Amino acid sequence: MTDVLKALEQRSSTRGYTEEGLTKEELDCLIRAGLQAPTAANRQEVHITVVSGENPILREIEEEKNKKAGIADSPHNFYYEAPTVLFLSAEEGFFWGRLDAGIAVENIALAAQGLGLGSLIIGCIRDALSGDKKNYFAEALKLPEGYAFEVAIAVGHKAVEKEPHTYSMEKNVTSL
């Protein structure tokens, strides 16, 4: 079995990380994996913003997420205390930007698995980052002009293990 197929088979969402940060080599590998993803018409419009898990902007995003959802603080923040969160944005209004960012984030998740790291793909902050504080967060995250948040991914060394999800070929696949 190839390394990619093994990573696909073994990957699961990680919701608990050690305090150990990523090395420069690990981070560079993850970024390269995201940037190597295919994009519509080879537009290469996906942008990655790297944020340390200690950056106060993450707490602000968490508070806005909770406010938008009408919930009180939860025991974990949206990135489960990961040491690094990557925010992927794309050209606002480009029809394929969200899909392109989704492909890039999956590349990052698979690269993280291949490096023995955990990851959690994050969409639950979309309302917070596209609401009335959209411009504030775009500036704080240094998104390029004309870009909008699409998806994020938390990455770090696993503090917990979780079995990959199960699926049903009969239920989820139709052959014609």
Image (tube, rainbow, N blue to C red):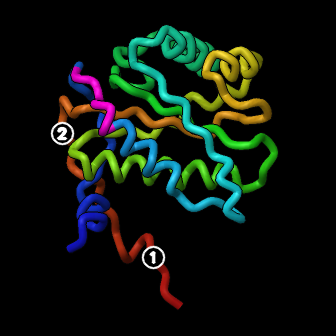
Q: Answer whether residue 21 is magenta in the image.
A: yes
Between label 2 and label 1, give the one nearer the viewer.
2
Q: Dot 1: few (<14), some (14–19), or many (≥20) neighbours within 10 Å? A: few
Name the side, left or right, on which 64 lies relative to 130.
left
Q: Quadrant of residue 91?
A: top right
Q: Which mark is residue 151?
A: none
How far across and how far down the image is residue 62, in percent?
Answer: 52, 16
Task: Give above or below for 142 relative to 38.
Answer: above
Name the side, left or right, on which 47 lies relative to 32.
right
Q: Answer whether residue 93 is magenta in the image.
A: no
- Count of numbered labels shown in the rendering: 2
Residue type, label 2: Glu
At 39% from the left and 18% from the top, the residue drawn is 53
Q: Which mark is residue 161?
A: 2
Q: Quadrant of residue 13?
A: top left
Q: Dot 2: few (<14), some (14–19), or many (≥20) neighbours within 10 Å? A: few
Residue segment shown in magenta: 20-26
Residue bearing mark 1: 173
At 65% from the left and 53% from the top, the residue drawn is 44
